[in-house]
Image (cartoon, grey):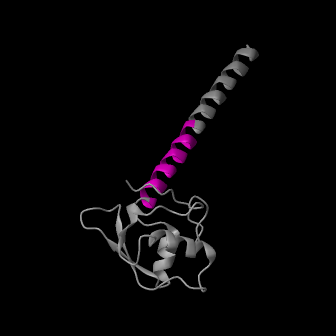
Amino acid sequence: MSSAVEAGATAGQVRIGVVVFVVLLALIIGGIAWRARVASTRPPADVRTLAERGYLRIDPVPGTRRDWTLVPLRPADSGLKPRLREWHAAIFVAGWAPVLCSQVEPPLDAWSAGVDGDVVPWDYS
């Protein structure tokens, strides 16, 4: 009789373990989906940093929440870290004219952490 009780307890523990695993998996997937949604509704961290420092202006494109017009305000200078200078050059590679964020080819290290630690993929299509 005691082995039947032990077997039942083990099966119950397995069920609890499976439920806990499924809940944790759902939370992880939900967090990733939320993060992707938040990331897709704002420009990358380095672009926002350039705007905060007065090197460009970010204007929303009417009718979309996933694209912005980047307007140059001043050229990159030695006051910028190399990473931000690379972003500035990548944004305004075609000249000193406004450009859509979706048309910018990011620097090679765009997948690494930005100035404020924000890691954002560059797919706004």
The image shows residue 70 at horizontal and vertical percentages of 38, 73
Number of numbered discs on residues? 0
Q: Quick one: which residue is furthest to the right in this view?
A: 2
Q: Quick one: which residue is furthest to the top in this view?
A: 1
Q: Residue at x 61, y 64 (%)?
A: 113
Q: Which residues are magenta?
A: 22-39
Of residues 46 and 18, the one nearer the viewer is 46
Q: Residue at x 35, y 63 (%)?
A: 67
Q: Is residue 115 left or right of residue 38?
A: right
The image shows residue 68 at horizontal and vertical percentages of 35, 68
* Magenta-drawn stretch contains 28: yes
Query: Does 69 appear above or below 27?
Result: below
Query: Does 3 appear above or below 51?
Result: above
Query: Does 31 appear above or below 110?
Result: above
Query: Does 44 appear above or below 21?
Result: below
Of residues 11 and 65, the one nearer the viewer is 65
Quadrant location, the N terminus: top right
Q: Residue at x 59, y 82 (%)?
A: 80
Q: Residue at x 44, y 73 (%)?
A: 92
Q: Is residue 85 left or right of residue 65?
A: right
Dominant secondary structure, magenta: helix
Q: Is residue 68 left or right of residue 117?
A: left
The image shows residue 3 at horizontal and vertical percentages of 75, 15
* Magenta-drawn stretch contains 77: no
The image shows residue 99 at horizontal and vertical percentages of 36, 70
